[in-house]
Image (cartoon, rainbow, N blue to C red):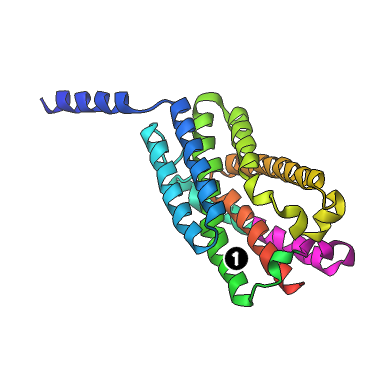
Amino acid sequence: MARIRSRILSRVRIRRRIGTRTAVGLTVAVLAAANLAVHRWPGPPGLLTAVAGTALLLAVLRWAGGTPADAGLAPDTLARGARWALVLIGLVAAVYLAAALLPATRVLFQDSRYEAMTGGEVLLRAFVLVPVGTVLLEETAFRGVLYGLVDRDHGAVRATAVSSVLFGLWHVLPSLGLATAKPAVEGVFGDSAAGAALAVLSAVLFTAAAGVLFCELRRRSGSLLAPMGLHWAVNALGYLFGHLLR
């Protein structure tokens, strides 16, 4: 009797699962809402959005029958992912240090957004806002849930394409003021409306290409921690070096 009841409950659970397309649609809807909220209320309020969005996305994955392994969070892969992350952080730090020491590339760190920041605010961004407000949500969404859902049914190539295209589009709003904030970007695209549009398009294409790299790190390491480490290093160390070189 107990076995019959267990089988019935198991079938009911399977029937209640949502399909991959529905799960991807829900994921995109959550991300769209989160993107607007983070853009409207940046800083500490964005942390709540990021944490809530991450929880919702993992719930969607589970609703679709996904597992921690689908999100790159299987316990037996975390140590390997952590090692990848540490190596990638070291590589980014070395590249940034070399760029900071060379006059020709030092200008790349110039950003008007750093001028009014105190050291404490930069540390807050580097060690709280970036890892929680940016890396946690974006990596869980794009290299965790989206990648895992599509990869399960269609393979790594399509998963990488879907994840990376959406990752590029995610950066439309954050890139709107890029041309005026960074002198190096303004020097390339100018200060006209057309130049600003080209700067946004370039940022979208660049981040989509970066998304391909992040997905490959996720695939090769088998862990979400690898792209998380690289993502944190690129953003957080950029803040630290930019502040020191202003």
Question: Measured from the top left, where is residue 180 in percent x and y?
Answer: 76, 57
Residue 212 position by quadrant = top right
* Residue 103 image point, x, y percent: 88, 67
* Image: magenta residue range: 88-110
Question: Quadrant where the N terminus lies?
Answer: top left
Q: For the residue marked with disc 1, what is the amino acid?
A: Ala
Q: Can you name the residue that lies furthest to the bottom here?
A: 119
* Residue marked by disc 1: 126
Residue beneath the point at 59% across and 39% down: 219
Query: Does the magenta segment cover residue 4?
Result: no
Of 65 and 226, the residue lying toward us: 65
Of 153 and 18, which appears nearest the observer?
A: 18
Is residue 41 or residue 142 the one in the foreground? 41
For image coordinates 60% across by 49% down, the residue present is 227
Q: Quadrant of the C terminus?
A: bottom right
Residue 87 occupies quadrant: bottom right
Q: Is residue 160 above or below residue 87?
A: above
Q: Nearer the viewer, residue 44 or 227?
A: 44
Q: Secondary structure at mark 1?
A: helix
Along the horizontal axis of the image, is 23 left or right of 158?
left
Q: Is residue 53 above or below residue 232?
A: above
